[in-house]
Amino acid sequence: MSHRIINPSSVAAPAGPYSQAISSSGQGTWLHIAGQIGVDAQGQLAPGFEAQARQAWANLVAVLAAADMTVADLVKVTTFLVDRSHLPSLGPVRSSFLGQARPASTLLIVQALAHPDWLFEVEAVAFKPACA
Amino acid sequence: MSHRIINPSSVAAPAGPYSQAISSSGQGTWLHIAGQIGVDAQGQLAPGFEAQARQAWANLVAVLAAADMTVADLVKVTTFLVDRSHLPSLGPVRSSFLGQARPASTLLIVQALAHPDWLFEVEAVAFKPACA
Amino acid sequence: MSHRIINPSSVAAPAGPYSQAISSSGQGTWLHIAGQIGVDAQGQLAPGFEAQARQAWANLVAVLAAADMTVADLVKVTTFLVDRSHLPSLGPVRSSFLGQARPASTLLIVQALAHPDWLFEVEAVAFKPACA
């Protein structure tokens, strides 16, 4: 097996759809995904936090698909918000995209993203075994 | 050898227990560790910055152990603080956990973490060679 | 081929010299590079944002070189600024170092870096195939 979820009982259980760690081994393909934001293929920014988060996650899934991967191949997701009050509306969006996937995750509130209108950004690392 | 420390003389020596880079090669297992915070296995948040940093590092080591790894396998550590005035008390904690290990490291002061009471978070990537 | 640029048409084209993702496969060497800042080999901090960004990128290239790599081997670059008004002067610096390289990238504005005089930091992950 090449993806293994690490959730030791000596550490509090993850408080969301993630794992404390993912171990990956064997031959395969690594994918490093740039920070995705709430802009669609036509360059249009989605209105408001929740719509931006949904679009950014849709972009992430589209990038995975272009590399012949799915959310099941994600090993690490890093999420950036600019306002903690947006956090409650992130959960449902994230869960709807992740399904049963439980990548290791970090979430940060940063001062700002590259553009003042951007409210959400998500980057990721994925690994797909050569012969699963 | 599969872990190699990179500290070129053309770059200032690391100002702490880290390396400018770690190179990793050969067969082995990668571990992507989620951001660890100062909460113990019972869900209790440690009081104050230093205790939180100590608990978060203890969690990181516990996650490594659950994957049959140690701090010697760390290749990258990323540390997040919410207040730079906490920085002086981090050094001893970090050193006590790292021992002789010198992973590549980045330290950032962010606006906030996911919960307003969290003062410290640390995530990491580790690699353990298949046959060291 | 071991480095592959992923820029699906379903996601807006990158708004700069980066890729939406880089996929990497096969035997090779991974390099995790610590956050580089605008300090030269003598420990002198460059004056002002643009000079710091130039020095930090020069350090990054020196670290790559010490591992027998170049910017062509970069798969992910993460850039940290402390003031978004510095962003316009970053583009030319970044382009001059990257040349034709297009690593996956994320750029964040954080509250601060480890030292109050540091205005720029850049970290990276690189992969060099064993036999390209």
Image (tube, coloured by chain):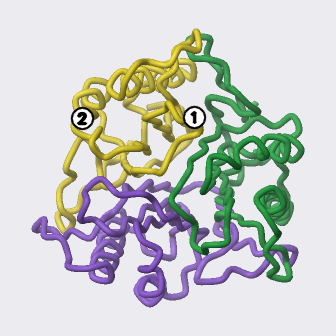
Chain colours: A purple, B green, C yellow
B77 vs A1: above or below: above
Crowding at mark 1 (Cα within 10 Å: few <14, some 14-19, many 20+): few
What residue do we see at 49% from left, 54% from top? A30
Please identify the quadrant where the C terminus of chain A is shown: bottom right
| Image mark for residue C91 | 2
* Residue, far front: B85
Amino acid carrying label 1: it is His
SS for callout 2: helix
Q: Nearer the viewer, residue A44 or B32?
A: A44
Amino acid carrying label 2: it is Gly
* Residue, far left: A42
Name the residue carrying label 1: C115
What residue do we see at 43% from left, 61% from top? A123
SS for callout 1: loop
Q: Where is residue B18? Give x, y as percent.
A: 71, 33
Whether residue C29 is visible to the viewer of this picture, yes or no, is no
Whether residue C58 is visible to the viewer of this picture, yes or no, is yes
- Tell me which numbered mark, 1 or 2, is placed earlier along the sequence: 2
Q: How many numbered tags mark residues here?
A: 2
What residue do we see at 44% from left, 80% from top? A85
State left or right for residue B3 relative to residue C83.
right
Quarter holding residue B4: top right
